[in-house]
């Protein structure tokens, strides 16, 4: 989006849009003139935004709930598979909790609550799949795609917490020298492992040897896959530890298997945790090298009429969606359109698709 305030001195000019949308338009005094490809904005949009912010909260919640329910009925193929997996886990942990309460076995109750917490995390991922395709609106002008990044981060945090809990169990087993996994948990572990292996097969497409995310959906689905793999490993460790302790007589089998499982989960999950954290903290994407940004800035400063770069910021809205803002000081006699065209060309030639906003400040007369 490009806009220029009336008058020469101290004027502001803006350029925004992706590489697919090359339309420019000039705004003066709140009106807009566009080329037919960009959104027309003026005083009406500002008043509409203010009205939307003053909506009745209950009415807004009802409208959002209706929209989300409609999208859930038309989930993607991966969304339907995840919904079926969550349904299986809900049925299983309900039965396990009921049986644990009936027999007064704290191990079954604890495992049921762990599965319930895991289902809540997976429900966050399902909600992100259903809602992330909503179009941008006045409240979320960039859209809802980053919800899948947040869902992937939530899965990564949950799995890191699982690894920490396994580490605590291992230390407790070493210090107290008491079995942490009673024999009656063997059947529960086998059932839980079988259900999670079904999920691993359903989402095997999103297993990655090298983590290179192309979009926000990749982060969310990879987090779902790691969740199922980690739960399978945890159940497998219970099976192996029970067999080693009560079958082979290995004294510290539980501590060894818990430590190994915790280390494996951390190694698998940490790349996802780091990638999602970088996106949510709005750091420069790893695929965008600092040297490329410096070369682009040198080309911009070499443009006729550009005197200085006041500010330059680049971050990823989601994997594959680069956003940048520039604030340039230009000569008061410089041609706005020519400067904007050359600045845009400099960044697109090296960075590819970028949603770029440029603010031009003229030097005072």
Image (cartoon, rainbow, N blue to C red):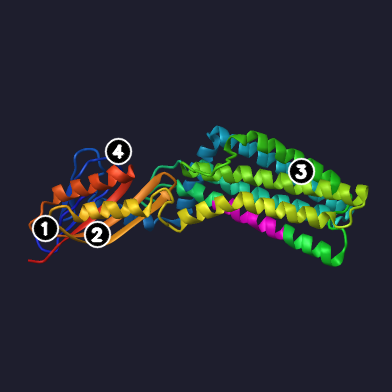
- Of the numbered discs 4 and 1, the one sitting upstream in the chain is 1
Q: Residues within 10 Å of mark 4 (few under 14, many from 20)?
A: few
- Residue nearer the viewer, 168 or 26: 168
Stretch in magenta? 153-165
- Of the numbered discs 3 and 1, the one sitting upstream in the chain is 1
Q: CA distance from mark 4 to mark 1?
A: 29 Å
- Residue nearer the viewer, 311 or 299: 299
Asked which secondary structure carries label 3, the reply is helix
Residues marked 2 and 1 touching at CB (< 8 Å): no
Q: Which residue is mark 2?
A: 327
Q: Which residue is mark 1?
A: 6
Asked which secondary structure carries label 4, the reply is loop
Question: Was residue 150 drawn as part of the magenta stretch in this picture?
Answer: no
- Of the numbered discs 2 and 1, the one sitting upstream in the chain is 1
Q: CA distance from mark 3 to mark 2?
A: 55 Å
Nearer the camera: disc 4 or disc 1:
4
């Amino acid at each position: 989006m490009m806009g220029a305030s009336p008058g020469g001195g101290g004027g502001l000019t803006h350029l925004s849009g992706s590489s697919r949308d090359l339309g420019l338009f000039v705004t003066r005094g709140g009106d807009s003139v566009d080329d037919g490809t960009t959104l027309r904005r003026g005083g009406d949009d500002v008043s509409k935004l203010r009205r939307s912010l003053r909506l009745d909260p209950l009415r807004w919640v009802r409208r959002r709930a209706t929209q989300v329910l409609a999208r859930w009925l038309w989930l993607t193929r991966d969304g339907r598979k995840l919904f079926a997996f969550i349904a299986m886990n809900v049925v299983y942990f309900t039965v396990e909790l009921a049986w644990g309460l009936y027999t007064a076995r704290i191990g079954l109750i604890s495992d049921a609550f762990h599965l319930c917490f895991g289902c809540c995390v997976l429900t966050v991922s399902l909600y992100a799949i259903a809602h992330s395709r909503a179009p941008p609106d006045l409240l979320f002008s960039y859209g809802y795609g980053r919800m899948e990044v947040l869902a992937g981060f939530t899965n990564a945090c949950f799995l890191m917490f699982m690894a920490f809990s396994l580490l605590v169990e291992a230390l407790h087993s070493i210090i107290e020298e008491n079995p942490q996994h009673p024999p009656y948990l063997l059947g529960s572990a086998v059932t839980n492992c079988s259900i999670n292996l079904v999920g691993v097969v359903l989402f095997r497409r999103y297993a990655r040897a090298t983590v290179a995310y192309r979009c926000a959906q990749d982060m969310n689905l990879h987090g779902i896959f790691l969740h199922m793999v980690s739960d399978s490993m945890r159940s497998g460790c219970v099976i192996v530890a029970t067999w080693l302790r009560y079958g082979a007589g290995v004294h510290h089998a539980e501590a060894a298997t818990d430590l190994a499982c915790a280390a494996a989960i951390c190694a698998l999950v940490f790349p996802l945790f780091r990638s999602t954290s970088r996106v949510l903290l709005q750091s420069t994407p790893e695929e965008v090298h600092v040297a490329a940004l410096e070369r682009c800035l040198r080309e911009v400063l070499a443009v006729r009429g550009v005197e200085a770069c006041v500010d330059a910021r680049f971050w990823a809205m989601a994997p594959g969606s680069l956003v940048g803002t520039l604030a340039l000081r230009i000569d008061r006699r410089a041609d706005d359109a020519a400067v904007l065209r050359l600045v845009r060309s400099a960044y697109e030639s090296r960075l590819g698709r970028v949603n770029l906003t440029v603010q031009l400040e003229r030097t005072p007369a």
